[in-house]
Amino acid sequence: MAKTRELVRRRKAIANIKKITRTMELIATAMRVAHQGSPPLARAARMARAAFGGVAEFRKWAASHCDVARLLGARMGLPGQVQQALRHLYERWDGNGMPGELCGTQIPLPVRLMQVAQDADVTWQHGGAELVRSKLAERAGSGLDPEAVKAFLAAGDRLVEPLGLTSARWQVIGAVSLAGQPQTVPSIARAMGLTRQAVQRLVNELVADGLIEGRPNPAHRRANLFALTDLGEAAVADASARQAPAKSSSGFDDMDDDIPF
């Protein structure tokens, strides 16, 4: 019984931490972009009033920010669909976004795709493919469109699936290839932004499949170096060739056939 209460307490604590983190992120965003044209003292005063106004005040700021973006889009002669997308950049799938007018499939498709890509890009810089997968899966159905998340994650694996790879394993091979010389597991982990344990598991799988091989390390007897085999080099060349056509395609019309919604 005591263990159950402790588990519930920990879950509540984690939920509270997430709420605080999200609030701090919103405040940080406001501090970066709010009232940029005003003098420092006037800007500070407006931010103070906004702080006392709480979420309601912040929603007003977000709405005005999006309205300005839409008006700029109109002045630039952008299509109506783009202007509509600019109006709802901060919406969330669950309806708890800013300004909170739309939810679910009411949010323009380009915005839903942009949100997934943006989260993936930021998360990638902090933890590589493994963290991208976990964070997108965590936010699917709350902040992000779950079908867009599913399509995004499947696209990466689909690109290298014919080579018997996943996107995470491809990332390890790519890190070794880009380094231009044999790498230790810790150095691969640093390049990918992942833990050594996570990379070690992937390296073991790639060694078993004959894509990379271990070599003695003159500088550290217990930390082997890993290099691509001939099979690994061929996989890099093949995956790079597959990646080029994927990069060249652009526009939402081109993506419609690949997105299941």
Image: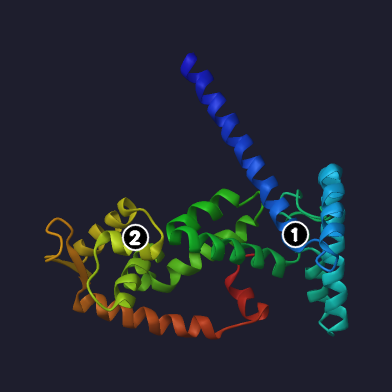
Residue in view at x 15 percent, y 64 percent: 219
The answer for how far apart the CA atoms under marks 2 and 1 are is: 33 Å
Q: Are marks 2 and 1 in contact (CB under 8 Å)?
A: no
Above or below, comparing residue 159 to residue 34 in the picture: below
- Quarter assignment of residue 148: bottom right
Look at label 2 and name its amino acid: Ala
User: Can see residue 59?
Assistant: no
Residue in view at x 61 percent, y 59 percent: 147
> In the rendered structure, which disc, 2 or 1, sits on the residue that comes first in sequence?
1
Please indicate whether residue 13 sits to the left or right of residue 83 in the image: left
Above or below, comparing residue 211 to residue 45 in the picture: below
Look at label 1 and name its amino acid: Tyr
Quarter of the image with the C terminus in it: bottom right
220 and 226: which is toward the camera: 220
Which circle marks residue 61 in the picture?
none
- Tell me the SS state at disc 1: loop
213 and 180: which is toward the camera: 180
Residue in view at x 53 percent, y 19 percent: 5
- Tell which residue pokes out farthest to the front in this image: 41
- Mark 1 crowd level (few <14, some 14–19, many ≥20, 10 Å Cα): many
* Residue located beneath label 1 in the image: 90
* Residue located beneath label 2 in the image: 189
